[in-house]
Amino acid sequence: MKVVKFGGSSLASAEQLKKVLDIIKSDEERRFVIVSAPGKRHSDDIKVTDALIRYYRAYTSDQDVTERQNWIIQRYKTIVDELNLDYSILEKISESITKLATLPIEGNPFLYDTFLAAGEDNNAKLIAAFFRKNGLSARYLHPREAGIIVSSEPGNARILPSSYDKLEELRNEDDILVIPGFFGVTANNQICTFSRGGSDITGSILAAGVKADLYENFTDVDGIFAAHPGVVRKPDSITELTYREMRELAYAGFTVLHDEALIPAYRGKIPLVIKNTNNPQHPGTKIVLKRRSNGLPVVGIAGDDDFVSINLSKYLMNREVGFGRKVMQILEELNIRWEHIPTGIDDMSIVLRERELTPIKEEEIVSQLTRKLEVDHVDIERDLSIIMLVGENMKSHIGVTATATKALSDSNINLEMISQGSSEVSVMFVIKTENEKKAVRALYRAFFPREDS
Amino acid sequence: MKVVKFGGSSLASAEQLKKVLDIIKSDEERRFVIVSAPGKRHSDDIKVTDALIRYYRAYTSDQDVTERQNWIIQRYKTIVDELNLDYSILEKISESITKLATLPIEGNPFLYDTFLAAGEDNNAKLIAAFFRKNGLSARYLHPREAGIIVSSEPGNARILPSSYDKLEELRNEDDILVIPGFFGVTANNQICTFSRGGSDITGSILAAGVKADLYENFTDVDGIFAAHPGVVRKPDSITELTYREMRELAYAGFTVLHDEALIPAYRGKIPLVIKNTNNPQHPGTKIVLKRRSNGLPVVGIAGDDDFVSINLSKYLMNREVGFGRKVMQILEELNIRWEHIPTGIDDMSIVLRERELTPIKEEEIVSQLTRKLEVDHVDIERDLSIIMLVGENMKSHIGVTATATKALSDSNINLEMISQGSSEVSVMFVIKTENEKKAVRALYRAFFPREDS
């Protein structure tokens, strides 16, 4: 039993939907289909979700909405026409879109979510009709009927743990269920959307709920590469990756799936595969709890910029019980999220993302460290990048750090900081951003040797 | 103007005291002489300070003290005889020692300190007399007269900042001043001893107080070695070392001077030299604020054992604002001092000295981390050692970490953790204790190449 999720670009046109149909037909285990709103057909195109935002703005600012409505309805109509679907489905979609502009504006915190959710919702209706027309016993299912009951947090809904029992009952359904992603309903029957990673979250929840054997996430890439293809020429694609490895890579810039979307599947121990709608024969990248070793210590190399470091030192810092906690307290009171705190004996660095450090907060931190904690020295280092060398197998490979540091040193790249914790899933290097690409390339060459280079 | 401090083994016998006299005579800048109590003459000998402790115990438990007193007086008498000193000095010493057993026991928190301090105090009297007899214009000075006024914390006295003005006046004295180390007097005129590093602290305070050009600390070794001579055969001795480097090395097991003793000299920016009373021609090891590069990136390699690591992981830990602070709060409430906290994305290690983690505290930490912070996993790793690779010049040497990790890897030593902060004065490796000596040797070979190895 598989839960299959398709992203917006996989559902943007009739041509794409035919690929989706073939994918569902080719494996009868594919029983739950989670769909996004139609995405862009070409780079200048407008996503249906963005069109719904414009529609919402027009409606709430009391402008004429006819043009906005028509654009959206027309967008669906193009697909309905190309697929030769019965117009009854278009009428339903049209009605749904038009009806949005009759909902109360005042005292309705769920209005924006309701507008946005219509993109996925109507696409699910359309796709269910398309499946049926092509001989599949398929049915559209609203998240309300599915049992995706969420917290009342507009734009940031969280699945209620009690939902899972109801979701499990869906296992007994005979039809292929086509369910819109991106939103659930509150206990008071309001539409409420998830945060970033929208439809991916729905897929992840469904997979955990129905205890799927696999959660297939169809995108427009052949899975995840061992390094960014914009930095390393034709990097290897990764066959298998653990959830922990995925997290470490996502942290430092790998953005195929938003990591929050992975939580339900991770907790439910459901393996996930990232596949390409346009190349479904490609095995893609499987994300699992545990994986077999492929003989290589490193699975991927990620790099991300816009980090800064607050470096402080104080003679005999190490002797002060509570010093570290006090530093952290200052950061927390200023609502600053830090990333790492490598420590020497009398010095400590606080590595954080640049956006966390506004000029006002920076001044306040320096002032508090100097005044309250009486540090001898504090400075701020900017333009830093983090390089993550990731791989569960590193722990059984003596010398990974040696190979990595030698590769960086041979490329004349100075290490600002280095941190390797006990988990040994990753080694983190902090370097100057100007060296980031050079560093990723050097590390890639060191850990992914190939004949043609 | 130099402040010169002699340790117990430099003052244990007439033979040693003659060396001390030569040292003082050979440089007229040596104007302040800080002395310890007589130390051991051979490995089975008893230090005067330890004899004073036995004397104190006998007195406070109402036993006969005559034998204890006589042993101590006899100890000084041997030196007086060997040096042919006038018996008037021995009478003073004898009176001082005997008088201790007349002091009030009840309600006297300074009694123990007063007993202990008598070792240094009487030795200073003896040495001043010895200097005078040999033509030096020297004079004994009690810390009370010198102006070493300290806080009322028996066994843990701290110099009062106001003392420094009075101390500076000592610059105008014509005599060579012989001052007992290890203690000061409180504002209420009570004898109060410093904590660990006793006489070294007095020397350090004096050096800062009189704004000395140099603080000479005479011991029985030719200074500091680049690695422990018990681990590495005939290691290089270090010519020059910065205070920061000294701190990092002291942290991981280098114990020539207790680092707390260095604070006054460090704050006063007084350079310090560690020299050998038995080999005063040897330049020793100079500890300075800044040093010239000697071309080597690493100045010393230290290793210390008895560390443990609390390793914890939690999926999406990284997203929880305040997680690190909460961990630290738990540790602080249990009064546990931690050393380092290397972090991954979803994991964190807390490295601490084994003595901090009693079984009860261990249980409490694990319980609180699991219950309050809901970590997914926590384990305790024991038998760890820390290896510190220290050198201010590392920051200008790309590749130090590469060389170090390669040396460890070539010796088949797995790195449990590695941390290099922004200061780049040191790189810290955490390894299994069973590999500690092997690691120090491997690193020594890598950074201190020599022809005969």
Image: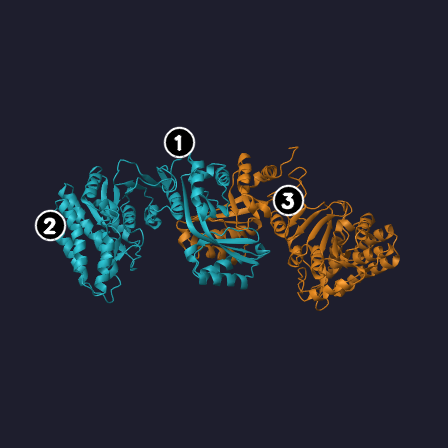
Chain colours: A orange, B cyan
Q: Chain of mark 1?
A: B
Q: Chain of mark 2?
A: B
- Coordinates of residue B341 in the picture (x, y in percent): 49, 52
The reply to whether callout 3 and callout 2 are in contact (CB within 8 Å) is: no
Q: Chain of mark 3?
A: A
Q: Which residue is mark 2?
A: B87
Q: Which residue is mark 1?
A: B452
- Coordinates of residue A326 in the picture (x, y in percent): 46, 57
Q: Earlier in the sequence, mark 1 or mark 2?
A: 2
Q: Residue at the location (73% across, 67% down)? A: A189
Q: Residues within 10 Å of mark 2 (few under 14, many from 20)?
A: few
Q: Against A435, is B170 above or below?
A: below
What is the three-letter code of the residue carrying label 3?
Answer: Asn
Instruction: Give the alpha-carbon distance from disc 3 to disc 2, as whole Å.
Output: 85 Å
Circle 3: element type: loop
Q: Nearer the viewer, residue A52 or B333?
A: B333
Instruction: Give the alpha-carbon distance from disc 1 to disc 3, as whole Å.
Output: 43 Å
Badges 1 and 2, same chain: yes
Residue B235 position by quadrant: top left
Circle 2: element type: helix
Residue B335 position by quadrant: bottom left
View extreme (top): residue: B451
Q: Which residue is mark 3?
A: A294
Query: Which marked residue is nearer to the observer: mark 3 or mark 2?
Result: 3
Q: Against A208, is A377 above or below?
A: above
What is the three-letter code of the residue carrying label 1?
Answer: Asp
Q: Residues within 10 Å of mark 1 (few under 14, many from 20)?
A: few
Q: Nearer the viewer, residue A189 or B183?
A: B183
Mark identifier at residue B74: none
Task: Answer with left or right where residue B92 lies relative to residue A100.
Answer: left
